[in-house]
Image (cartoon, rainbow, N blue to C red):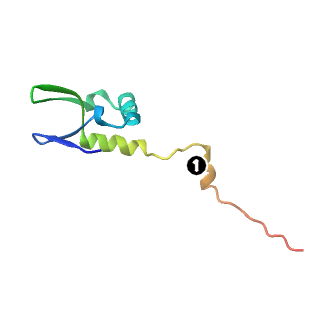
Amino acid sequence: MRAENFRGIVYVRISNLPEDQKTQIWQSLERDKIIRIVRENTLLNDCVLYQDYLSWLEQQKVPNTGPKAEQASTPIKFRMAFR
């Protein structure tokens, strides 16, 4: 995602994100992380500081800790049989 810079404020607009990220970020990001910026007489009310966006994105990449993850970490034991 390309960040924008306005008067030293580096941010991304939620409306410019891919569709799946738009939905997820609106549902999961804390509302106080969504900021408003007035730029050229236009109110941008769907901005997120770039650093907050990167933090949110990193949280989305946390590996699944369900049963499959546990199975993958369990060592496999082999027995050899001789005739």
Residue 53 image offset from top left, x and y in percent: 30, 40
Q: Which amino acid type corresponds to the residue marked 1 in the rendered image? A: Ala
Q: Say above or below: 45 vs 16.
A: above
Q: Secondary structure at mark 1?
A: helix
**Residue 49: which quarter of the image?**
top left
Q: Residue at x 63, y 51 (%)?
A: 71
**Residue 34: which quarter of the image?**
top left
- Residue with the mark numbered 1: 69
Q: Residue at x 9, y 39 (%)?
A: 7
Q: Quadrant of the N terminus?
A: top left
Residue 31 image offset from top left, x and y in percent: 30, 27
Residue 19 falls left or right of residue 11: right
Q: Residue at x 35, y 40 (%)?
A: 56
Q: Say above or below: 47 vs 2.
A: above
Q: Residue at x 21, y 39 (%)?
A: 11
Residue 53 falls left or right of residue 68: left
- For this orientation, the residue located farthest to the bottom is 83
Q: Quadrant of the C terminus?
A: bottom right
Question: Which residue is more in the foreground, 38 or 27?
Answer: 38
Residue 48 image offset from top left, x and y in percent: 25, 35
